[in-house]
């Protein structure tokens, strides 16, 4: 990584580290950017590009000269810019391919042909711009570098240099990594998602309470009472949606990462491990957000709870076999493979309970919402679940019960 300082004091960073990221999960993207910063420098600029994010990192502050020249020349898809620097036998070289800067560096005249030889193997048509007496030609010429005719979309010799005259915009100045990430509003997006989920759950509670029938006198004598009680637990879809939102929230704890989670009836406990943040910082964050954190020998335990409505009581006991078949068939559409295991059946007086275990391996949290949709309206109870978390993916089991006769 090189530094180039102009006579007017403007400092440019050459050859910074660049990487194109396509992570959709905002919390995972944030953690990956922080990891790249640890390895490639604490100054960064992040651009939205090609359906993802182009992250640029450097160990020194300054402006991005390659991007500045590319923007000044109209942002051609593929660009080769070569400018002689005054008083030096060196050329400033900028190469852009597929709308991304791949090279911005200084090359000695004597090494120019050798250093740029790799371009002759590219199946690309470049817009070529040249300034000054650099050993570069449009057609083959002894002692000078040239591209094949089929690789040249246009060839322009400029009458004035860009390095000393180009105006720098604030958007091309490297920022601290924390500020560059903050400008993406990743935490804001996650917060909006959580607030939206909370609003939906509140609306579900209001609608359910509005539709619920008043209690029937003498209901304690109802022979269906135990069956009805079992199925008045929160719907599996609501529980799984809540868990997916809670996992996102756990991944947004600053400086900590969840590694395990267990849940039941809308409540989840996450085992957290630090990635550089002290325990005092975690406790302060929990206090600010009115959340419960318990310190353990392994790190910390974060408790998250989402209020979920109970379901309306069923009026009759259904046949368990069609329900069991529907559970297996519907979940198999969401989780292809041998991931569903039917367990033992236990009698409970006038009905019976069949246990079903769902195995998840490296599964995205969003799949939980698909599973909830698949299980909608079925007379089943979701008991509990336990998972390990690795890079935002779940591995573990969910226990549910099919109730009927």
Image (cartoon, helix red, strand yellow):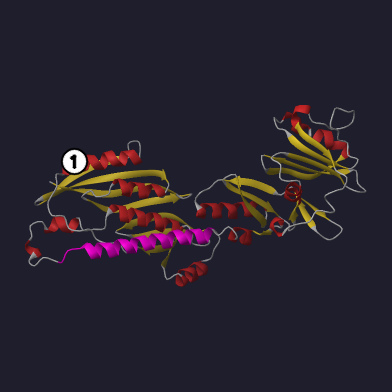
Secondary structure mostly seen in magenta is helix
Determine if the magenta segment contains residue 191: yes
**Residue 99 seen in the figure:** yes
Q: Looking at the picture, how far across and down is residue 51, in whole percent?
A: 56, 45
How many callouts does the rendering have?
A: 1
Q: Looking at the picture, how far across and down is residue 21, in whole percent?
A: 58, 46
In the image, residue 313 above or below residue 393? below
Residue furthest toward the right?
A: 87
- State the residue at coordinates (29%, 41%): 330
- State the residue at coordinates (18%, 40%): 322
Q: Based on the displayed image, in which of its 4 quarters is residue 77 positioned? A: top right
Left or right? Give the position of 85 relative to 389: right
In the image, residue 230 above or below residue 110? below
**Residue 347 seen in the figure:** no
Looking at the image, which is closer to me, 140 or 302? 140
Q: Based on the displayed image, in which of its 4 quarters is residue 97 positioned? A: top right
Q: Which residues are magenta?
A: 186-214
Q: Looking at the picture, how far across and down is residue 200, in whole percent?
A: 36, 60
Categorize mark 1 by other alpha carbons within 10 Å: few (<14), some (14-19), many (20+).
Answer: few
Left or right? Give the position of 279 relative to 139: left
- State the residue at coordinates (9%, 64%): 220
Residue tagged by mark 1? 322
In the image, residue 7 above or below residue 374? below
Left or right? Give the position of 379 relative to 195: left
Determine if the magenta segment contains residue 266: no
Left or right? Give the position of 274 relative to 354: right
The kind of secondary structure element at disc 1 is helix
């Amino acid at each position: 990584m090189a530094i180039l300082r102009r006579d007017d004091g403007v400092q440019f960073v050459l050859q910074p580290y660049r990487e194109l990221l396509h992570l959709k999960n905002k919390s995972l993207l944030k953690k990956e950017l922080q990891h790249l910063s640890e390895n490639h420098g604490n100054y960064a600029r992040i651009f939205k590009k090609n359906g993802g994010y182009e992250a640029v990192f450097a160990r020194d502050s300054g402006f991005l000269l390659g991007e500045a020249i590319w923007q000044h020349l109209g942002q051609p898809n593929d660009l080769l810019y070569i400018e002689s620097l005054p008083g030096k036998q060196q050329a400033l070289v900028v190469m852009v391919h597929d709308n991304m800067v791949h090279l911005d560096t200084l090359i000695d005249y004597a090494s120019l042909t050798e250093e740029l030889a790799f371009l002759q193997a590219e199946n690309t048509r470049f817009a070529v711009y040249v300034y000054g007496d650099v050993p570069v030609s449009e057609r083959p010429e002894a002692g000078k570098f040239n591209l094949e005719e089929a690789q040249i979309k246009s060839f322009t010799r400029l009458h004035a240099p860009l390095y000393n005259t180009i105006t720098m915009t604030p958007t091309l100045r490297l920022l601290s990594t924390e500020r560059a990430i903050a400008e993406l509003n990743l935490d804001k997006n996650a917060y909006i998602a959580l607030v939206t989920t909370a609003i939906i759950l509140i609306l579900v509670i209001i609608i359910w309470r509005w539709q619920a029938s008043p209690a029937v006198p003498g209901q304690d004598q109802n022979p269906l009472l135990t069956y009805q009680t079992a199925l008045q637990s929160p719907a599996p879809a609501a529980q799984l949606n809540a868990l997916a939102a809670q996992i996102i929230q756990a991944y947004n704890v600053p400086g900590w990462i969840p590694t395990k989670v267990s849940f039941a009836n809308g409540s989840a406990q996450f085992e957290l491990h630090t990635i550089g943040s002290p325990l005092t910082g975690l406790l302060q964050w929990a206090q600010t957000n009115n959340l419960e954190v318990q310190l353990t020998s392994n790190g910390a335990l974060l408790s998250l709870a989402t209020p979920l409505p109970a379901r309306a009581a069923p009026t009759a006991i259904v046949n368990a076999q069609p329900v069991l078949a529907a559970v297996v068939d519907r979940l198999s559409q969401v989780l292809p493979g041998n991931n569903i295991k039917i367990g033992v059946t236990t009698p409970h007086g006038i009905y019976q309970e069949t246990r079903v275990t769902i195995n998840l391996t490296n599964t995205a949290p969003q799949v939980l919402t698909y599973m909830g949709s698949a299980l909608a309206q079925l007379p089943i109870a979701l008991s509990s679940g336990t998972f390990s978390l690795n890079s935002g993916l779940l591995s573990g089991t969910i226990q549910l019960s099919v109730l009927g006769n």
